[in-house]
Amino acid sequence: MNDHRITRRSFIKRAGAAAAVSAFPLSVVEMAFADPSQRFTFAYISDSHLQYVKGKEFVYNWDRGLIRAVAEANLLTPKPDFVMFGGDLAQLGMKEELDHGAEMLSRLKYKTHCVMGEHDYYLDLGEYWSKLFGPHHYSFDHKGVHFVVLNSILTTDEWTHKRWPTAKQRMLEMAGLDNPNGSPFMVGEKQREWLSKDLEKVSKTTPVVLFSHSPIQKLYKGWNFWTDDAELVQAMLQPFEKVTVIYGHVHQIQYNQIGNITFQSVMATAWPWPYPESYAQAKHAMPKLTVPMNRADPFFERDATGWQFIDMETGRVVMEYNLYNNTNRVVAYNPATRRPEDRAYQNPAKRIPPQNHF
Ligand SMILES: [Fe+2]
Ligand SMILES: [Fe+2]
């Protein structure tokens, strides 16, 4: 959607201002919506990485990130129809961490759907998580949109079941960002078969939104910003007219368009990952964190953390990033260019020039 289209929130602001200043009839403003019944919003919180220390103690900063997101989501007007939690609720998959996270999420006033992250999974392969949050993959329909949740952080049986002497070691190996002992993520054959059946009953004109933890695209293998069978999943989604994949895991804003599929990532509440300095660098090298980024400061741990408010505008995702220490940003599909764009950043006149770090 372009910049001129009225959003629900700007509508509310304008309607309020109009009523106060000129008694402008509200109904005229309401006419701006083609079909208001189709439109709804949801909130997206992700990557809280709650980390157990000892006794009743957890890493304070990670706790604060999630507490803030929950509190702000509860204050939203208009109320979101539901909340997604995008995975990595825990840091090392511990019962204490998952219980702590479940208790915090239970304070949300809305129905909450959860996505599995690798930090939730690799200690007990998602067993305790399931007790708290349900199945690892599922779908649901809401106001004409088909939503799908996949567990995209699986890997080979050999790596999962045979390589590590203990479950704890397996968890630690998968928890590192640039650990060469990790293994590329995949959705796997079983879920792909399930997805293909699930999508069979969905009309090609129904908007589809798929939630995964890792990107269902191959961005950067060295950091596991990667899903090994991404192309196979993408092929199942391509026939749909409006399809968006929303993912966490990368702790930074990313957006992309592959054929018909719009990809948008969400922020973490815990910390931002920097951008790889070059996607062509050595496979397992951690780039120096001196990064020429203009979207997050890697030396400021609260920069580029936050949560998301998503407006399903005519079946497309309009994502507002609520950044704790930055100006909010909106990334939305632009029908003119047929790709997602940052409503401010994509405009060269408004673009923030690269910052000089030294
Ligand atoms: Fe994460
Ligand atoms: Fe992750």
Image (cartoon, rainbow, N blue to C red):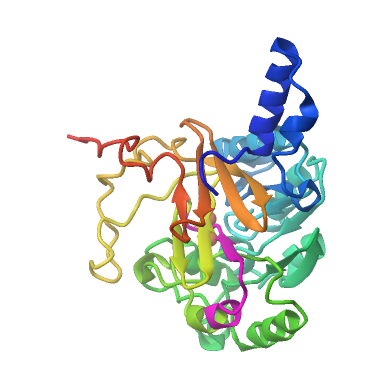
In the figure, is residue 9 to the left or right of 267?
A: right
The count of marks equals 0
Q: What residue is at 63 percent from the left and 60 percent from the top?
A: 93
Side (left or right) of 88 relative to 223: right
Camera sees residue 48: no
Residue 209 coordinates in the image, percent (x, y): 65, 64
Q: Give left or right: position of 91 versus 81.
A: left
Q: Which residues are magenta?
A: 234-250
The question of residue 221 being in magenta is answered with: no
Q: Position of residue 22 (x, y in %)?
A: 71, 13
- Residue at 39%, 35% in the rendered image: 300
Q: Find out whether residue 240 is within the magenta segment.
A: yes
In the rendered image, the vertical position of residue 35 relative to residue 232, given as above or below = above
Please tell me whether residue 87 is drawn above or below residue 75 in the rendered image: below
In percent of the image, x 54 and y 51: which residue is there? 266
Spot the residue most to the top: 21
180 or 303: which is nearer to us?
303
